[in-house]
Every structure is written in C-alpha cells, then in structure tokens.
Image: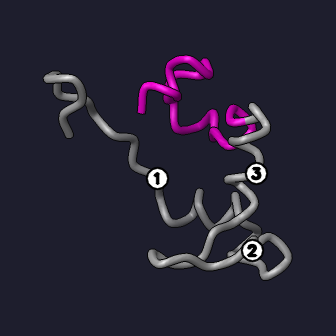
Amino acid sequence: MRKGGKDIELPLFSFASISAATTNFSEANKLGEGGLGPVYKAWELWNADQGLDLTDPILGYPSSTSTLLRY
C-alpha cells in the first residue's frame, strides 16, 4: 500500500488473534453491521485511545500508539 508516495507495510492478523480479540466473534462484542460486515468493540477501544489493548505482544509488532497510527 502507498501513503504519501511511500510504500508502507500493513499488518496482518491471524484468524486466531482476531477471534480472540472479539471473544470468538461474540454477539456481546458486536456493535453493529456496516456495508463491509460486522463491527466489534475493538473499534470502541481504538477510539478511546486504548488501541494498544488490541495488540498481541506475541506478534512482535511495534508497541507504541504513534507507530500504530501510521497504519
């Protein structure tokens, strides 16, 4: 993907990590559904500046909010 004329690498998440973050796609964690599918509470965490709570330390991605916001 390109952003501002520079190539950036987008993070990839395994199905297992997404399933864990949404408690196996639990209806209790579902906020609603849009044109691209269901939206889960992870978006609420991101908007509450708790985006680092979404990261899985096992994945080894950068762990600062400013780094995550680049994506």
On the rendered structure, is 49 left or right of 59? right
Q: Please name the amino acid that badge 3 sits on.
A: Glu
Quadrant occupied by the C terminus: top left
Q: Please name the amino acid that badge 1 sits on.
A: Phe
Crowd class of label 1 (few under 14; some 14 to 19; many from 20; radius 10 Å): few
- Decide whether residue 58 is among the magenta residues: yes
The mark closer to the camera, 2 or 1, is 2
Q: CA distance from mark 2 to mark 1?
A: 19 Å
Q: Are marks 2 and 1 in contact (CB under 8 Å)?
A: no
Q: Position of residue 65 (x, y in %)?
A: 62, 22
Which residue matches tag 3?
44
Which span of residues is magenta-colored? 51-71
Q: Which mark is residue 13?
A: 1
Q: CA distance from mark 3 to mark 2?
A: 11 Å
Name above or below for residue 38 compared with residue 10. below
Which residue matches tag 2?
30
Residue, x 49% and y 29% (percent of image)? 61
Q: Which mark is residue 61?
A: none
Residue, x 24% and y 29% (percent of image)? 3
Q: CA distance from mark 1 to mark 3?
A: 19 Å
Quadrant occupied by the N terminus: top left
Q: In terms of sequence position, does the residue under pointer 2 or pointer 1 come before the other?
A: 1
Crowd class of label 3 (few under 14; some 14 to 19; many from 20; radius 10 Å): few
Q: Position of residue 11 (x, y in %)?
A: 39, 41
